Image (cartoon, rainbow, N blue to C red):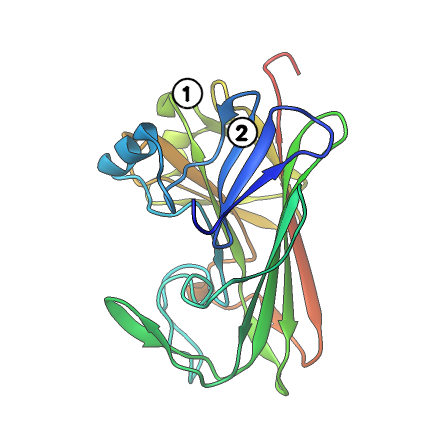
Amino acid sequence: MTNINVLTHPSLEAVTARVYRGQTIGFSVDGTEYIHAGAHPSTEEAHKRLENGAWRGSDLVCFPIFGPAENLPEGWELNQHGMWRAVNNELSGITGSSADFKQSYDAGTKIAVPGKPSMSLPFSYSLDKRVALTGSEKPALQTSLVVSNTGTTSFPYDLGLHPAFITDDYEQVRIAGRELSDLATPHTMLDNDEYIDVQNPGRNARLYSNFKKVIVWSPNAKSGMFCVEPVTGISKDGLAKIIEPGETHKYASLLVPYSNSE
């Protein structure tokens, strides 16, 4: 259980979350698990999903790009989805119901990546992530991100969350009313006005966020998992945001399970 932080809801029983090195690998409500624990599989079911081609991640943060490392600005040396998973995420604070992680990067630092090219960026930043169990009557999993420009020059970026969800019935999953099988291969971008409705038998949920887009993706129908990813955009098409020195930009998502009767 090394490096796993277990969170409990402050007022609701049988609501827990598990976080491993900054990635949420579990969100359980009354015994129902919502998150695919690809980043740290510890159950027979998780290992079976991986054998069927499931993603070996759970809750990646994609920064300062989302998607393939193509059409990058001069001086950017990155792999797919950027720096976050390669740079140390330090546990900076924890309570019974929340965990805070901080990542800091200094311009020009080379980051080694096993089996892949090293990465570096020409600017400095910090990225804070908080995972918290919230909700007074209905349980919710909140993920908050704060991007800070800690350097002396502005830089563009994209940002994305990459949560992975379990499903026992891939063909019955509907995302914003559309069949998962029509959206997930290779991927589809949807507009996000307020929330995305995730109809997943036995695991219905609404995913709220202040991101304007979401990406729907799954490796295959047998994997038993899929991702609904709040994003600022796909970076190869142009970086969506610019942050000035000393500025901070804040983002958040909220996953709220609901029953068929609601």
Q: Is residue 218 above or below residue 234?
A: above
Cβ atoms under marks 1 and 2 closer than 8 Å:
no
Camera-nearest residue between 193 and 1: 1
User: Looking at the picture, which amino acid does disc 2 mark?
Assistant: Ser
Expressed as whole percent of the image width and height from the top left, the position of residue 254 reads 64, 40
Residue drawn at (42%, 84%), measured in percent from left and top? Answer: 75
User: Looking at the picture, which amino acid does disc 1 mark?
Assistant: Gln
Camera-nearest residue between 182 and 230: 230
Q: Is residue 113 above or below residue 223?
A: below
Expressed as whole percent of the image width and height from the top left, the position of residue 102 reads 58, 64
Q: Quadrant of residue 243?
A: bottom right
Q: CA distance from mark 1 to mark 2?
A: 21 Å
Residue drawn at (61%, 28%), measured in percent from left and top? Answer: 15
Residue at the spot of label 1? 172
Residue drawn at (27%, 38%), measured in percent from left and top? Answer: 50
Looking at the image, tell me whether mark 1 or mark 2 is earlier in sequence order: 2
Q: Quadrant of residue 103?
A: bottom right
- Residue furthest top in the image: 261
Tell me the element at label 2.
strand
Mark 2 neighbour density, 10 Å: few (under 14) some (14–19) many (20 or more): some
Expressed as whole percent of the image width and height from the top left, the position of residue 151 reads 62, 84
Expressed as whole percent of the image width and height from the top left, the position of residue 61 reads 50, 56
Quadrant holding the C terminus? top right
Mark 1 neighbour density, 10 Å: few (under 14) some (14–19) many (20 or more): few
- Residue furthest front in the image: 2
Camera-nearest residue between 87 and 207: 87
Name the disc covering residue 28, or none: 2
